[in-house]
Amino acid sequence: MGIIAFIIIGLIAGLIARAILPGKQSMGLVATTLLGMVGSLVGGLIGSLFERNGRLFDLHASGIIMSVVGAIIVLLLVGAAGRRRVHA
């Protein structure tokens, strides 16, 4: 997958993850794209645990779904770290 496709999928996954999770996430378009890109990597690693074809970065529907799942996981972890830091 090319870098442009990775950035576009990251943006889409980040936007969907932010739309799914309730609450206010104060981040801009670049941060949302980075969230989706990291989520795509996390989702790809989780997906590779269930699929053994050796192709981690192929573009397919389950990869996009796992990118959104990974972005949601990253968003929850960032939110939990932010809440812990503010209250500590």
Image (tube, helix red, strand yellow):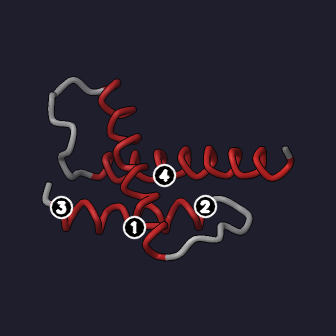
Are the residues at dot 4 and dot 2 in contact (C-beta closer than 8 Å)?
no
Residue most extreme to the right: 87
For residue 3, the mark is: 3
Q: Quadrant of the N terminus?
A: bottom left
Percent position of residue 24, x then y: 71, 69
> Foreground mark, 4 or 3?
3
Query: Who comes first in sequence, dot 4 or dot 1?
Result: 1
Cα–Cα span, label 4 and label 3: 18 Å
Cα–Cα span, label 2 and label 1: 12 Å
Of the pair 82 and 72, the residue shown nearer to us: 82
* Residue underneath mark 1: 12
* Residue underneath mark 2: 20
Percent position of residue 61, x then y: 29, 52
Percent position of residue 22, x then y: 71, 62
> Image height check: is 70 above or below 54?
below
28 with respect to 55 (left or right): right
> Foreground mark, 2 or 3?
3
Q: At x 61% / y 49%, what residue is drawn?
A: 78
> Foreground mark, 1 or 3?
3
